[in-house]
């Protein structure tokens, strides 16, 4: 018997019980356990039916993702599933938790399925850039029809037990605490009935009906074209379902295998699997003792009723925290409370929130004009204008007002947190909580750990991120921290390229084609030219446009014109400003194709990421990838700049940087880390 397997027998029913924490992924040990269990129970004449179930928090959560790309150790999943499917004894899956991916496919190879009422099942492989590769694409449409199968597999959302029952995916739903006993009763009934075993592979009713309606697929493609852009897996899933309705089962499975391998070997899936593990790694802090307890946070405060303060207040109140929002400007405070109310009402109108929930969220927010209202808060987040003198004076005041033992946080996006902390007598309780705008929506929370920030403060911030459903990335203290610092070189390069004769529209197009939802100039026009950029004294294209009152979409247009009721168009006025400044700069004109442009824009980002790592400002390379995916919408299927650099080749990045350095100086010299990794054949994304 393997370590993960237990067998129990009762009244002619053999139970295969697998326990492989944390999520019973179908790695080698689990497959071996299942295979051994099946062999033992098939050979046992006293056993007339078999139940497969799991201990721990969930039924099988799918294939073991960490095994992909490595040689498969036998028994492989297909072999185990065939043993289950072709068993002469009825096999019943008893599901609890989440039966996902290969786990759900295993259940679909059993003859019957019973599920706890709290269980869910789904085929989320699409989120890993894959498709269900253990016959899921052929079995699911035979049970639920092509339409529902496409929704479940190409969109990747699981279904709850009651829906699974109505779809015919499970045969019975059972109270969770009664799962084992009820599965036993179910098995005994199956034995007593001695009916022929159900066989999904020969079911034709659903696929025959779907065959008469080829529009299903074109309509599905059209409906989700925007969502699927750049991803490879959805199209392969659609093709696999087309095969399910047009081919006999065995040929459909062969087609599924081809489409699966294509995805497994794709850059997109490599990137998406990298992101899966990277997201889960960000809250693992080397050297942090597990016994460190978080500071209690029951009540919160936000200082500043501007855009950031408002977003943070919305995020905290949505997560259930009472929030005191303070701004000495009563009018600004009123305005912000009005916008908060509108935002909540908007969510109600869109059906995202019940009116009661919205009222309760608003009721959790208390506006005040005096910072003394923070006295009893456990956490206060400062979100005022980025000015060091202002922030240090605020923190020294907060230090005297807010009770001892409370956490004081700054939302600064680039100022030195250690200086801010030094303005208090409790630097150990000061931390950076850098939200990205809009703070109630963007999923990244950069946690800035100062020199003196205590481990308890860090653990508290990590817990806060979890409760806010944001992904934390821990950063050291440096200008711009991780996301803004790593991304700044793309903007700088875009600004430079327009002086070398490349149009803003071309730069935006290249970024869009890469997969960013917006190009740098489109983004500036949206945010406002007056908001971006800290070098207001220098004469630049941007400062000139601001001087002309061209502030972006909000006023007169920016890099683009915004004619009423039509798409943005390149602006002749902006082009004239660019031409004037370019003439003054006298730079040679660039001759670059789209790929060359992309390399110029993104290689400096990779270089900055490598420097952030070398300086120890990020804990690991994959944290930088997550910061840019969650904070700047870097396309998930590129895996972030560090993984992308590995995929295009560090040599190409280094060559691009060397050429830039030869032309423009050492700011572009490849970082020693890049050079070393390239020489050693190492991978940047694994640092
Ligand atoms: C597949 O099945 C392909 C087949 O169709 C075809 C094969 C031929 N493998 O998320 P959590 C780890 S593809 C390996 O924090 P939660 C995870 O890394 C698979 N490891 O917990 C983490 O490790 P650590 C299709 C896995 O409670 C720990 O478990 N299945 C896997 O918030 C806890 O994870 C999926 O895509 C795995 N499959 O959520 C399901 N799953 O502690 C992917 C998890 O070291 N998994 N780990 O950081 C999930 O969606 C969530 O983990 C789950 C639990 C909902 C199960």
Image: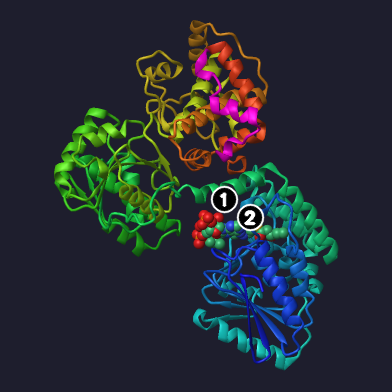
Answer with the quarter of the image where residue 391 lies: top left
The residue lying toward the viewer, choosing from 383 and 662, is 662
Which residues fall within the magenta stretch? 665-687
Q: What residue is disc 2 on?
A: 65
**Quadrant of the image where one finds ligand 1:** bottom right
Determine whether the residue tagged by mark 2 lies in a helix, strand or loop. helix
Q: What residue is disc 1 on?
A: 276
Q: Position of residue 206 (x, y in %)?
A: 76, 70
Label 2 crowding class (10 Å Cα cut-off): few <14, some 14-19, many 20+? some
**Dot 2 beta carbon under 8 Å from ligand 1:** yes
Q: Position of residue 276 (x, y in %)?
A: 57, 50
Q: Residue at x 47, y 27 (%)?
A: 488
Q: Residue at x 70, y 88 (%)?
A: 190
The residue lying toward the viewer, choosing from 8 and 380, is 8
The residue lying toward the viewer, choosing from 494 and 145, is 494
Q: Position of residue 288 (x, y in %)?
A: 39, 49
**Residue 135 can be seen, yes or no:** no
Check the image and report above or below for 674 versus 34: above
Q: Position of residue 344 (x, y in %)?
A: 36, 54
Apparent side of residue 465 relative to residue 516 in the rendered image (left or right): left
Determine whether the residue tagged by mark 1 lies in a helix, strand or loop. helix
């Amino acid at each position: 018997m393997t370590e993960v397997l237990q067998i129990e027998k009762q009244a002619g029913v053999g139970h295969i019980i697998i326990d492989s924490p944390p999520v019973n992924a179908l790695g080698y040990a689990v497959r071996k356990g299942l295979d051994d269990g099946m062999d033992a129970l098939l050979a046992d004449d006293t056993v007339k039916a078999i139940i497969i179930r799991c201990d721990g928090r969930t039924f099988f959560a799918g294939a073991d993702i960490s095994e992909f790309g490595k040689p498969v150790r036998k028994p492989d999943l297909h072999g185990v599933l065939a043993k289950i499917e072709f068993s002469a004894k009825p096999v019943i899956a008893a599901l609890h938790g989440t039966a996902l991916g290969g786990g759900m496919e295993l259940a679909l190879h059993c003859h019957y399925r019973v599920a706890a009422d709290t269980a869910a099942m789904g085929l989320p492989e699409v989120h890993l850039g894959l498709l269900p590769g253990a016959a899921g694409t052929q079995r699911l449409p035979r049970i639920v029809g092509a339409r529902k199968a496409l929704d479940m597999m190409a969109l990747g959302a699981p279904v709850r037990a009651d829906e699974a029952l109505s779809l015919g995916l499970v045969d019975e739903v059972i109270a969770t605490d009664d799962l084992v006993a009820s599965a036993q009763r179910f098995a005994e009934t199956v034995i007593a009935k001695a009916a022929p075993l159900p066989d999904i592979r020969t079911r034709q009713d659903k696929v025959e009906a779907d065959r008469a309606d080829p529009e299903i697929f074109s309509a599905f493609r059209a409906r989700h074209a925007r969502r699927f852009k750049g991803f490879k897996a959805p199209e392969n899933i659609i093709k696999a379902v087309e095969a399910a309705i047009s081919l006999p089962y065995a040929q459909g499975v062969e087609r599924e295998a081809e489409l699966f391998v294509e995805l497994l070997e794709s850059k997109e899936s490599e990137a998406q699997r990298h992101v899966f593990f990277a997201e889960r790694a960000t809250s693992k802090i080397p050297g942090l003792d597990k016994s460190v307890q978080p500071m209690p946070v029951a009540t919160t405060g936000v200082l500043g009723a501007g855009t950031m303060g408002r977003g943070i207040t919305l995020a905290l109140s949505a997560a259930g925290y009472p929030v005191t929002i303070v701004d000495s400007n009563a009018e600004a405070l009123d305005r912000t409370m009005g916008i908060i109310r509108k935002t909540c009402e908007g969510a109600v109108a869109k059906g995202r929130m019940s009116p009661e929930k919205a009222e309760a969220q608003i009721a959790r927010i208390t506006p005040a004009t005096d910072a003394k209202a923070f006295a009893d808060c456990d956490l206060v987040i400062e979100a005022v204008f980025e000015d060091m003198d202002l922030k240090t004076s605020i923190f020294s005041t907060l230090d005297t007002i807010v009770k001892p033992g409370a956490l004081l946080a700054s939302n600064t996006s680039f100022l030195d947190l250690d200086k801010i902390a030094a303005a208090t007598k409790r630097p150990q309780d000061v931390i950076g909580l850098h939200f990205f705008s809009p703070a109630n929506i963007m999923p990244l929370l950069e946690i800035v750990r100062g020199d003196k920030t205590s481990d308890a403060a860090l653990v508290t911030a990590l817990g806060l991120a979890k409760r806010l459903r944001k992904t934390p990335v821990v950063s050291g203290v440096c200008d711009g921290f991780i996301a803004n610092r790593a991304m700044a070189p793309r903007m700088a390069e875009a600004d430079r390229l327009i002086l070398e004769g490349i149009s803003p529209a071309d730069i935006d197009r290249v970024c869009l084609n890469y997969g960013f939802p917006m190009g740098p100039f489109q983004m500036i026009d949206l945010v406002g030219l007056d908001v971006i950029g800290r070098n207001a004294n220098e004469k630049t294209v941007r400062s000139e446009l601001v001087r002309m009152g061209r502030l972006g979409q909000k006023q007169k247009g920016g890099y683009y014109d915004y004619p009423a009721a039509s798409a943005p168009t390149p602006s002749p006025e902006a082009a004239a400003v660019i031409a004037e400044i370019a003439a003054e700069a006298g730079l040679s004109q660039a001759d670059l194709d789209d790929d060359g442009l992309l390399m110029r824009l993104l290689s400096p980002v990779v270089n900055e990421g490598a420097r952030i790592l070398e300086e120890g400002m990020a804990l690991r390379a994959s944290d930088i990838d997550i910061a840019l995916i969650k904070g700047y919408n870097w396309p998930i299927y590129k895996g972030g700049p560090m993984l992308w650099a590995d995929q295009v080749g560090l040599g190409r990045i280094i060559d691009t940087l060397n050429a830039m350095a030869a032309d423009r100086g050492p700011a572009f010299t490849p970082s020693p880390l890049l050079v070393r990794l390239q020489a050693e054949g190492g991978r940047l994304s694994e640092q």
